[in-house]
Amino acid sequence: MYIVGDLIARTQNGKQLPAVAPLALQSGEQVARNIRLAVEGKAGEPFVYIDKGAMATIGRNRAVAQIGRFRF
């Protein structure tokens, strides 16, 4: 059984993963790969979330971003 998208609540390295769209997208892609592997008779792979950072528009021609330890 798989739970993905907005319903997913996961921890990784002892920390709760954020409830954001990238988590939903990455988990959905991993489930699709694992279903394909199961159809082929192979073992599935564990899910590992990759945080690619965050960015938000805060006004015309202005935005804030956090990528790793860098903040802009």
Image (spheres, helix red, strand yellow):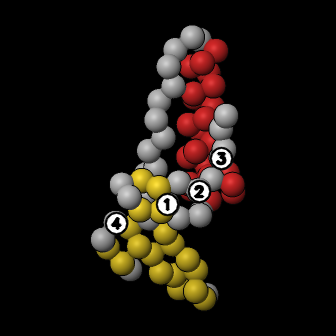
Amino acid at the residue labelled 1 = Leu
> What amino acid type is highlighted by mark number 3?
Val
Pointers 2 and 1 in contact (CB under 8 A)?
Answer: yes
**Label for residue 29?**
none
Task: Give 63 or 51, whichever is nearer the viewer.
Answer: 51
Please state the horizontal and vertical placement of residue 25, each as a whole percent of the image.
61, 49
Judged from the image, the secondary structure of the residue bearing numbered disc 4 is loop
- Mark 3 lies on residue: 4
The x, y position of residue 15, in whole percent, is: 41, 62
Residue 68's disc is 4
Q: Which of the two discs, 4 and 2, labels the residue nearer the N terminus?
A: 2
Which kind of residue does numbered mark 4 sit on? Answer: Gly
Disc 3 on helix, strand or loop?
loop
- Residue beneath disc 1: 17
Locate the C terminus by quadrant. bottom left
Image check: 59 left or right of 6? Answer: left
State yes or no: discs 3 and 4 in contact (Cβ < 8 Å). no
In terms of secondary structure, where does tag 1 sit? loop
Within 10 Å of disc 2 (Cα), the crowding (few <14, some 14-19, many 20+) is some
Mark 4 and mark 1 lie on one chain; the one further toward the N terminus is 1
- Whole-angstrom CA distance, mark 2 to mark 3, is 9 Å
Q: Residue furthest left?
A: 69
- Mark 3 vs mark 4: in front: 3
Residue at x 59% of width, y 39% of height:
29
Which amino acid does the dot numbered 2 rest on? Ala
Residue ID for mark 2 = 9
